[in-house]
Image (cartoon, grey):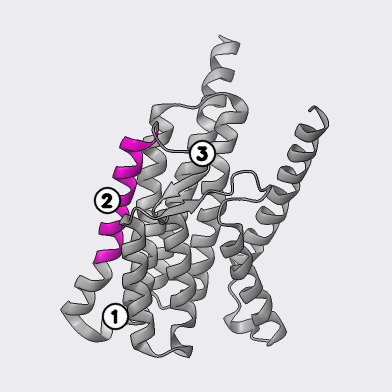
Amino acid sequence: MKFGVIHIIRNSIPNLFTLANLFFGFLSVMYSAQGDYKNAAILILIGMMLDSMDGRIARMLRVESDLGKELDSLADIVTFGVAPAMMAYYSYYSSFGAVGMAVAGLFPLFGAYRLARFNINAVKSSLKYFTGVPITAAGGLLTLLTLFHGKMPGYLFVIAFFILCYLMVSTIKIPSLKDIPLPKYGIIITLFLGYAIYLVFKKEQLRFPYFIYVAIPLYVAFIGYQLVRTKRKNSTK
């Protein structure tokens, strides 16, 4: 009986990370609707970290499952498809009315197609590259662009938006960088944190995204774990 409970808990741990990823995506949508784009962005950032962890934890615990893979895709479409699109809509496209809604809605549509294609080709895919830009990377980049869109011409934001949509469903080969001891999309995460630190130096405490206090310890802890794990792996070779 005790072994059965431990087995259930062990199998549930990666899925809890995935569900947390989805929940942070939902919260991001809520913050975007309230006009708090910085915290909305940080919540997507935290989702990116959790997305980097769930698969690795499942492999570490040897509890990979089809349920976990399907759940991961459902979480990704919310956190990296719907949530960034809602940020883009409320901060920019909302001024264009129904047209803005239609354009913003294209991002999760392209992302869903990309995820579906990846799922049916996962067995055939190479470990060295992705076919098309992953929705996590595209969602992270769109979030960054949304944060800075006020400092760039509107047409550049729209062009970048459509380029990201296209790249997700393209057949371009993107290096996976799986051998690097950083979370997936570590560069994007670092840019997020750099922006938050910039806000501190600007002394914009009232606008400082308080969810960063969750993101920074999470990121540092995971980087430390990855470095220790890589060092142990290299020492056993």
Rendered-image quadrant of the N terminus: top right
Q: Residue at x 49, y 61 (%)?
A: 44
Q: Residue at x 25, y 65 (%)?
A: 106
Q: Note whether residue 36 is visible.
A: no
Residue at the disc numbered 2: 113
Counting residues from the start of the chain, the first of labels 1 and 3 encountered is 1
Counting residues from the start of the chain, the first of labels 3 and 2 encountered is 2
Task: Please tell me whether the stretch drawn in magenta is mainly helix, strand or loop.
Answer: helix
Q: Residue at x 31, y 71 (%)?
A: 162
Q: In which quadrant of the rendered view does residue 2 lie? A: top right
Q: Note whether residue 195 is visible.
A: yes
C-alpha separation, residue under disc 3 versus residue under disc 2: 21 Å
* Whole-percent x, y for residue 15 in the image: 48, 36
Counting residues from the start of the chain, the first of labels 1 and 2 encountered is 1
Residue at the disc numbered 3: 127
Q: In which quadrant of the rendered view does residue 209 lie? A: bottom right
Marks 3 & 2, CB-CB < 8 Å contact: no
Q: 89 or 16: nearer the eye?
A: 89
Question: Where 183 falls versus 158 (above or below)?
Answer: above
Q: State the residue lying farthest toward the top.
A: 1
The segment highlighted magenta reads: 106-122
Depth check, mark 1 against mark 2: the one in front is 2
Depth check, mark 3 against mark 2: the one in front is 3
* Whole-percent x, y for residue 237 in the image: 78, 28
* Whole-percent x, y for residue 165 in the image: 32, 64
C-alpha separation, residue under disc 1 versus residue under disc 2: 22 Å
* Whole-percent x, y for residue 182 in the image: 66, 51
Residue at the disc numbered 1: 93
SS at mark 3 in the image: loop
SS at mark 2 in the image: helix
Three-letter amino acid code of the residue under disc 1: Tyr
